[in-house]
Image: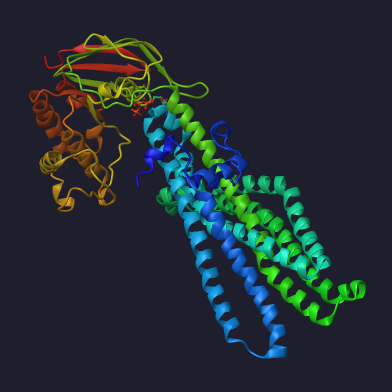
């Protein structure tokens, strides 16, 4: 089933079940139903109604098993063993098992599908975001927002659904207890009410503990990443290693404290809830006969009923922890979803893959862009013209703004000021996809995906040819639909990156210090053979380079310093 269609449309059963968790998403409240309207709204589509019927069936079976056991225990004394009762008992057990299994399976499946739809919608929105928005969100927040929090939530689903079923069972068994002994029923209700009240009273503290634990986890995860990424530096320098280890110990302690504070709260609740349950059974045996003069045979039946109640009570108490965890994860998911949605709606309404124009000329007049943050770096007053078939080099010192300029030109960053014209037509601040379709790029922080997305059979053939050309084909498997870039050196990976970019057959090629990691002969071939050949094929090339011995291999060179173009020189071939 495709969930995409459900995302914007009516609420699915899973969404309605999630609403029962208590949706905390601010603007979602307008769209989503309250717990009760969510519940009753479901009666229309039969979803929750069906699940409620199965939960009732399960509770009726569970209670009847208890009733039957109590009745049979008394009958055996007078009339002996009954085949019919034994058969009824087994039949009830079978139905009980089926209904419980069905309820948990169906409910968790529906919720997982709803979560899948949300994850999909958020992923879609993240794909719509501009590069600067994704950089603002940060890698970890994206990974958590579409991954980790969903994992946490998923782990709580089975216990929560089982707990919900426990609540229904509890109600039915309590009803039976009322019939047996109103006094015992009152004791049971008192225990349940006190446990729930205790949980609700400490919920704010629990939420704070959870937030603290999550913050500590984030900090620890960052360190754990450093443990792998910075392995070389740590391995070579014992002082660095010791200081890093101390930091890890501190963070780990913080994490342990955060987690154990939350666990301590739950433990106290669990222990109190369980002890109170046993106290309740004790009161039935030791105190009730003194107060009410109840008969011994009735006491036995009440005790059996109370013992049967202990299971659901304990399961409901344990569910509190899961519900808190689930609500927390859901709130984090919703907050991220809202943040991404707001960013995605702010601009870039263009989602079309529009017709790619025939590139003739790109002109920038007084263009500027400023990075986010305090004292952020800007590129300013950029004037440049790029014509079809040109090779344009951008040079300049580290941090002079070359990469930033390339990202503005490609539309990855919006231009904050000035005018960009393509073939004489002014571009919007966030240029449309049809414009971005002009470019293929190998930025210095490029990524090689596991699969060459976007390449059809003809594209794969082109990729194959370029890989052979760059003498890297033999390092990849026979089937280019799967690429393992982890086994490649930095220079080799860049060759694969360039081959992938060229296989896309775009009109403008952007390369950011591509040759920096290549051996001298490959570098020479790149500047003296590959670039001229691409130019001859009609490609326009925009390259950032520090290779001053090859500065003559372009048609024009722009030099940048402190975010401005300080030189724009033609005819470097003279
Ligand atoms: N995402 C970002 N957020 C904030 N500042 C940034 C960001 N990316 C780059 N900068 C800043 O912008 C400035 C220019 O960076 P840029 O990468 O454009 O320089 P560059 O000329 O390509 O440098 P290099 O030759 O070292 O690659 C730097 O001071 C950098 O710190």
Q: How is the image coloured?
A: rainbow
Residue 494 x/y as whole percent = 24, 39
Q: In percent of the image, x 77 and y 64: which residue is there? A: 188
Q: Is residue 478 left or right of residue 181?
A: left
Residue 10 x/y as whole percent = 46, 37
Which quadrant of the view contains residue 315? bottom right
Image quarter hosting the C terminus: top left
The answer to whether 10 is drawn above or below residue 49 in the figure is above
Q: In percent of the image, x 77 and y 74: which residue is there? A: 302
Q: Is residue 320 left or right of residue 95?
A: right
Residue 363 x/y as whole percent = 26, 11
The answer to whether 488 is drawn above or below residue 361 in the figure is below
Judging depth in this view, the residue of 125 and 193 nearest the camera is 193
Instruction: Examine the rendering and report whether any part of residue 263 can be seen.
Output: yes
Instruction: Examine the rendering and report whether any part of residue 255 can be seen.
Output: no
Q: In percent of the image, x 61 and y 59: which residue is there? A: 163
């Amino acid at each position: 089933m495709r969930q995409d269609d459900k995302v914007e449309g009516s609420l699915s059963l899973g969404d309605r079940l999630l609403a029962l968790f208590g949706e905390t998403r601010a603007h979602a409240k307008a769209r989503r139903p309250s717990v009760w309207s969510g519940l009753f709204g479901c009666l229309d589509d039969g979803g929750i109604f069906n699940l409620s019927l199965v939960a009732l069936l399960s509770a009726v079976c569970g209670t009847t098993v208890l009733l039957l056991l109590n009745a049979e225990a008394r009958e055996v004394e007078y009339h002996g063993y009954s085949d019919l009762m034994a058969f009824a008992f087994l039949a009830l057990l079978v139905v009980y098992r089926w209904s419980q299994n069905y309820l948990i399976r169906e409910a968790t499946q529906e919720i997982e599908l709803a979560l899948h739809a949300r994850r999909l919608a958020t992923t879609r929105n993240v794909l719509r975001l501009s590069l600067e928005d994704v950089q603002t969100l940060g890698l970890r927040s994206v990974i958590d927002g579409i991954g980790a929090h969903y994992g946490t939530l998923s782990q709580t689903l089975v216990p929560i659904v089982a707990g919900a079923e426990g609540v229904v069972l509890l109600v039915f068994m309590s009803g039976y207890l009322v019939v047996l002994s109103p006094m015992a029923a009152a004791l049971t209700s008192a225990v349940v009410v006190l446990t729930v009240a205790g949980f609700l009273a400490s919920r704010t503290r629990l939420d704070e503990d959870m937030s603290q634990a999550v913050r500590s986890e984030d900090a620890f995860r960052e360190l754990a990443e450093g443990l792998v990424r910075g392995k070389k530096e740590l391995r070579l320098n014992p002082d660095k290693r010791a200081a890093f280890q101390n930091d890890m110990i501190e963070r780990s302690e913080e994490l342990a404290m955060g987690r154990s504070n939350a666990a301590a709260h739950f433990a106290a609740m669990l222990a109190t809830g369980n002890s109170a349950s046993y106290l309740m059974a004790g009161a039935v045996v030791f105190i009730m006969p003194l107060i009410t003069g109840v008969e011994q045979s009735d006491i036995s039946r009440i005790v059996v009923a109370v013992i049967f109640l202990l299971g659901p009570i304990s399961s409901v108490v344990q569910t509190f922890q899961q519900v808190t965890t689930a609500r927390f994860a859901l709130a984090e998911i919703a907050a991220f979803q809202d943040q991404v949605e707001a960013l995605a709606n702010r601009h870039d309404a263009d989602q079309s893959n529009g017709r790619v124009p025939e590139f003739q000329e790109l002109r920038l007049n007084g263009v500027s862009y400023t990075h986010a943050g305090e004292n952020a770096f800007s590129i300013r007053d950029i004037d440049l013209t790029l014509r079809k078939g040109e090779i344009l080099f951008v040079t300049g010192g580290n941090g002079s703004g070359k990469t930033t300029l390339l990202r503005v030109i490609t539309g990855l960053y919006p231009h904050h000021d000035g005018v960009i014209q393509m073939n004489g037509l002014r571009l919007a601040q966030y240029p449309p996809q049809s414009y971005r379709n002009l470019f293929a790029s190998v930025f210095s922080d490029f990524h090689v995906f596991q699969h060459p997305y976007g390449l059809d059979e003809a594209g794969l053939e082109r990729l194959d040819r370029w890989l052979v050309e760059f003498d890297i084909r033999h390092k990849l498997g026979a089937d280019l639909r799967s690429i393992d870039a982890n086994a490649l050196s930095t220079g080799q990976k860049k060759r694969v990156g360039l081959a992938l970019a060229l296989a896309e057959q775009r009109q403008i090629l952007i390369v950011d210090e591509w040759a920096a990691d290549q051996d001298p002969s490959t570098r020479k071939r790149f500047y003296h053979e590959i670039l001229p050949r691409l130019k001859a094929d009609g490609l326009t090339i925009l390259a950032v380079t520090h290779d001053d011995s090859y500065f003559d291999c372009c048609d024009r060179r722009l030099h940048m310093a402190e975010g401005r173009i300080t030189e724009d020189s033609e005819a470097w071939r003279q």
